[in-house]
Every structure is written in structure tokens, then in C-alpha cells.
Image (cartoon, rainbow, N blue to C red):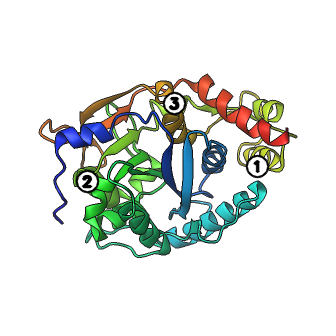
Amino acid sequence: MTFPQLSEAFRISRLQPPRNKVRIVLDTDTYNEIDDQFALTYALLSPESMSVKAVYAAPFHNNRSDSPGDGMEKSYDEILRLLDFLGIAADGFAFRGADAYLDAGRAPVDSAALRDLIDKALASPDDDPLYVVAIGAITNVASALLLAPEIIGKVVVVWLGGHALHWGHSREFNLVQDVPAAQVVLDSGVPFVIVPCLGVSSHLLTTLPELRATIGGTSAVGDYLCQIFAEYRPEGFAASSVIWDISTIAWLINADWLPSELTHSPLLTDQVTWSVDRRRHLVRVASFIHRDSVFRDMFNKIRGLGD
């Protein structure tokens, strides 16, 4: 596959942190853990910073699903559940994504999400890119780029995936289950913002007592987020969990919360390690996150539902 060649100046301009309200679509393996539910809620409660145009269910396979397709269906059902809590209609807004990962042959995996993403990207004005926020396996996004490579100049992809570039490996869940898709996106030249897991998003720790004290009893969705956290991480001495995925939403709200740098796109090897080639195009990579600022903003928005 040959992708359109963007000038480096154009790519750099697209990789500048947003300072105005942006349009986004959210690609999420919502039932995989508990962090996607927080991210979807956070995005929908941040209309001052973003307009969420669609939500796509992404495939996943772990102990909460029987197959990637089953994971996608469970994620789709979880999206509908959250939208119902928030009083948002799902028709024309929530879409099923791929039921399998992109394979080594790199043939696009068709889905309703893929078609909607392409349509929305192509309809985007040249000076108003669509932000594609991916917080799961990235097959839906890679498939869209392969099927309609012309959308490269119409989108900015923001992905929670892999670990920090200095880490010894990148066998992080979103990436390791979907290596060919990640390679496609990294190699395509699309404007790409990477928020690593270990070393960056791993700072986003919270506990059940904190959640109960800040968002418990404030709204139906606040209670639900406390409930799924308690089920996933039963209360215990010094027990915490990382709410990884809210990092991507936070970067769109206030990029100062996630210091980042432009660097040459890492080369993802088949051994799932990062390699360096300074001839490659530039991407933006987050290097830290100010945990308290992010949680304070999200908690206040969820608490606001009870006002």
C-alpha cells in the first residue's frame, strides 16, 4: 500500500496541540477493562473542548471475551449502556467495529464503524481535521487508512498504545494483540499522537475510596463507574487501578497536562519492540502526565451531573 505523502510542514502543523474545540470520534474496546468507560464519559462531558461525533466498538480478546468479535460486541453493548446513563441516543452515533484483527495480509476489516469513519473523515474541511481517538486495538483505524488512504490529510489519530519509547519492549495490550494494524498506522505517515502506557498513562492511578468520595452518589453514571471499579478491583489495602484511557481525552482538553515532543516515528518490529530510524516522519509522543489535574477535571464534570 502506498499512502499519500504529506509534507513535513503540514504534518507538524497538524501535530500542534489543539487550542480550540475539536471534532472527535472515539474508537474503544469499552468492555476490556474499566478505563474506557471513564474515557467515554469524560469525552461526552467535555463539550467545551470537543464534539463527539461517533463512538466505535473495537475488538479485544482476553478473559472478558471469547474472541475479538465477542469483545467488540460486548464493547458495543457497554457503549449503549453508558449512553443510556447519559441520556444520549445511540442511533447513528454508536457503531459496531471490526470482528477480527487486521492480519499479516493487511486486508481491511470491513465494519459499520469503518464506513462511518471514512465518511466523516472525507467530509471534514481541510482546515478542520477529524480527531480519531483510539483507545483499543487499532484495526478499525488501520482498515480505514488502507481502504481510503486519502483520509490521511483529513484526520489526526490520537492513540493510547505501546509503552514509552525508552521501554525495553512494547508488549502492551492494545498494541500486542494488533501488531500489523499498529505497523500500518505508524508507517502510513498519518498525523499521529502516541500516549504511551507504562511510563506515562500509568500515572493515572485511583482507588475505590477516592472514587466513592468524589463521584459516588452524584449521578447514575458516577455510581456505575464506582460499581465496575469495585467489581474489577475489589477493595483492599492499598489497592489501586490505572484509568489509562482518560489520558487521550485529557490531551485534547489541555495539552499542558501531558507534556509531549515531536520525534521520528518509532519503527515497530515484529518482536514488538521499538526501533529507531531518524529518516522517518515525525509524530508526537507524550512523555508525562499531571495526574491530579486530569482527575480533578474529570471528577468535577461527573459531579456536575448531580447539580
Q: Which residue is mark 2?
A: 270
Position of residue 178 relative to residue 7, above or below, is below
Residue depicted at x 75% and y 61%: 84
Where residue 76 appears, as percent x and y from the top left, is: 61, 67
Between the C-alphas of marks 3 and 1, the distance is 31 Å
Find out whether the residues at labels 3 and 1 contact each other: C-beta distance under 8 Å: no
Q: Amino acid at mark 3?
A: Asn
Q: Which residue is mark 3?
A: 254
Q: Of circles 2 and 3, which is in front?
A: 3
Q: Amino acid at mark 2?
A: Asp
Which numbered disc, 1 or 2, marks the residue that appears first in the sequence? Answer: 1
Q: Which residue is mark 1?
A: 231
Q: Of circles 3 and 1, which is in front?
A: 3
Quadrant for the C terminus in the image: top right
Question: Toward the viewer: 264 or 50?
Answer: 50
Apparent side of residue 242 relative to residue 260 in the rendered image (left or right): right
Between the C-alphas of marks 2 and 3, the distance is 34 Å
Which numbered disc, 3 or 1, marks the residue that appears first in the sequence? Answer: 1
Where residue 109 appears, as percent x and y from the top left, is: 38, 73
- Residue 220 got which mark? none
